[in-house]
Image (cartoon, rainbow, N blue to C red):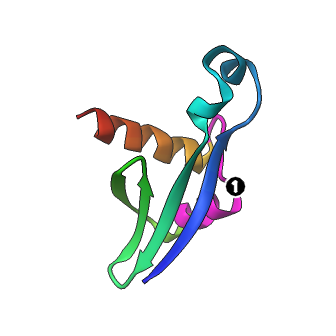
Amino acid sequence: MEVIKVNIRLIEGNVARIYGRNLFRYKAEIIRCIKGFYYRANGVIIKITPLEAKHVIRNPRLYFFSTALKLHILTQRKNSK
């Protein structure tokens, strides 16, 4: 099992100024194991594809159409249930 730590953050802009910069900055982990890839953030673990893992590792920023934003929304939805 391999764990890769990434720092997810929002690209600076109006949202960061309105809601605060720290709201959209957090640590996440990409977990690679025999069964596949998983994304863990804010106490939520979701299964992801190898391509999604590669994209988040290379670009851990939240902005329109980024994989990091897609996974952020998925973890927020699971966290709210």
For the record, the magenta segment spans 52-65
- On screen, residue 46 versus residue 64, left or right, reads left
Taking 12 as reference, is 31 above or below it? below
Q: Is residue 61 magenta?
A: yes
Residue at the image position 70 percent from the left and 62 percent from the top: 58
Q: Is residue 30 magenta?
A: no
Residue carrying label 1? 59
Q: Quadrant of residue 49?
A: bottom left
Query: Mark 1 is on which residue type?
Result: Asn
Q: Secondary structure at mark 1?
A: loop
Q: How many numbered circles are shown?
A: 1
Image x and y of residue 73, in percent: 45, 37
Image x and y of residue 28, in percent: 52, 55
Q: Quadrant of residue 10?
A: top right
Q: Nearer the viewer, residue 47 or 12?
A: 12
Residue at the image position 72 percent from the left and 18 percent from the top: 17
Taking 40 as reference, is 79 above or below it? above
Q: Residue furthest top?
A: 18
Q: Nearer the viewer, residue 19 or 52?
A: 19
Within 10 angstroms of label 1, few (less than 14), some, or many (20 or more) residues?
some
